[in-house]
Image (cartoon, grey):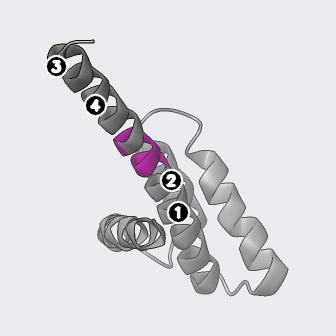
Amino acid sequence: MTTFDDRERAYENKFAHDEELNFKAEARRNRLLGEWAAGLLGKSGDDARSYALTIVTSDFDEPGDEDVYRKLSADLAGKADETAIRTKMVELRVTAREQILNEI
């Protein structure tokens, strides 16, 4: 085994770890978004948890955040505008990443 091979393996492991972290942070962010939106919709308890799960699953429609934004925008029509939703998406992304990193 050469130093180059060791370095290559280390980069591959770091990439895999970073991708896993990003996936977990996105899923956590979407759950947090769902909880936030559920509160705006007057949902609580099991209804809020079920709604949050719909936000998490909406992210599997296409790559990127637009599928989640469209779901939230449609559900929150009249309760939150585009700026509020997109701001909350960014804010909760940071929160989710911090939470995931604190669990490691």
Along the polypeptide, which appears first: circle 2 or circle 3?
Answer: 3
Quarter of the picture containing the N terminus is: top left
**Residue type, label 1:** Arg
Instruction: Please name the residue that numbered disc 1 is placed on.
Output: 28
Classify 10 Å Cα crowding around label 2: few (below 14), some (14-19), many (20 and above).
Answer: some
What's the mark number on residue 10? 4
Q: Is residue 19 magenta?
A: yes
Instruction: Please name the residue that numbered disc 2 is placed on.
Output: 24
**CA–CA distance between discs 4 and 3?**
10 Å
Q: Secondary structure at mark 4?
A: helix
Please give the range of residues in magenta: 18-23
Query: Image point 50% across, 53% down: which residue?
Result: 24
**CA–CA distance between discs 4 and 1?**
27 Å
Specify whether 68 is left or right of 19.
right
Q: Nearer the viewer, residue 75 or 11?
A: 11
Query: Image point 53% across, 63% down: which residue?
Result: 28
Q: Secondary structure at mark 2?
A: helix
Along the polypeptide, which appears first: circle 4 or circle 1?
Answer: 4
Q: Is residue 21 magenta?
A: yes
The reply to whether dot 2 and dot 3 touch (C-beta < 8 Å) is: no
**Residue type, label 2:** Lys
Q: Secondary structure at mark 1?
A: helix
Q: Nearer the viewer, residue 75 or 12?
A: 12
**Residue type, label 3:** Thr
Query: Image point 61% across, 85% down: which residue?
Result: 39
Looking at the image, how many numbered discs can be counted on the residues? Answer: 4
**CA–CA distance between discs 2 and 3?**
32 Å
The reply to whether dot 2 and dot 1 touch (C-beta < 8 Å) is: yes
The reply to whether dot 3 and dot 1 touch (C-beta < 8 Å) is: no
